[in-house]
Every structure is written in structure tokens, then in C-alpha cells.
Amino acid sequence: IHKIVPHSAALRLFQVHAVTEGTDAQAQVSVRLEEDGRIATGQAADTDTLTASAKAYVNALNNLFARKEKSRPEAAIASGF
């Protein structure tokens, strides 16, 4: 993921929980990232733990980038603040 979307975010939390039981159990993954004092979380679920992990990580990155974008001065001017 880092090769596709370069960033300097640090992984602060990685949790995996089984939502269901059995061989087709669904994994719920939570990820927390921090970059430049900003913290963002991401969550995802899938029967494949690696897929759920990647989705949660990308979700956290998207949330982090959205927070970063909102904090830019140009974004504040464009929104009327």
C-alpha cells in the first residue's frame, strides 16, 4: 500500500477480532494511523484477514488525508471560514 500511496503515517493500533466462528469466520480489523499529530482510524471486515487488514488500512489513510485536506488554508477559504 505504501508503494502505491506514499505517506509518513505511523501505525498506532492494529486489532483483529473474529466476528463469526468457523472456517468461514469474518474478521473485523481496526487500524489507527498518526501523521503530523493527526490521528485517523479505519475499519473493515472480510472473511480473509489480509483483505480486511488492507481495507482497514486504506480506510484509515483516506480518513487521514481527508483531515489533512480540511486543515489546509485553501480549504478553509473555499468553505467560507
Image: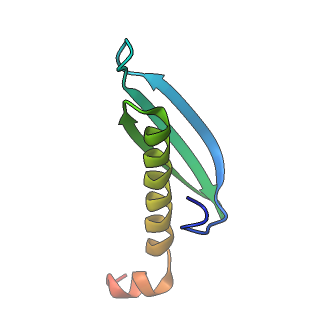
Q: Nearer the viewer, residue 74 or 54?
A: 54
Marks counted in the figure total 0
Q: Picture coordinates of residue 64 (x, y %)?
A: 50, 61
At a point 51% along the width and 70% down the height, the residue shown is: 68
Q: Quadrant of the N terminus?
A: bottom right
| Residue 77 position (above or below residue 60) | below
Does residue 54 lie above or below 17 as drawn? Answer: below
Give the vertical position of 19 relative to 14 (above or below).
Answer: above
Residue 23 position within the rendered picture, expressed as x and y whole percent measured from the top left: 39, 16
Q: Quadrant of residue 75?
A: bottom left
Could you say where residue 59 lies in the image, as x and y percent from the top left?
43, 53
Q: Residue at x 47, y 65 (%)?
A: 67
10 relative to 73 in the view: left or right = right
In the figure, is residue 59 to the left or right of 33?
left
- Quadrant in the rendering for residue 79: bottom left
For this rendering, which residue is in front, 61 or 35?
A: 61
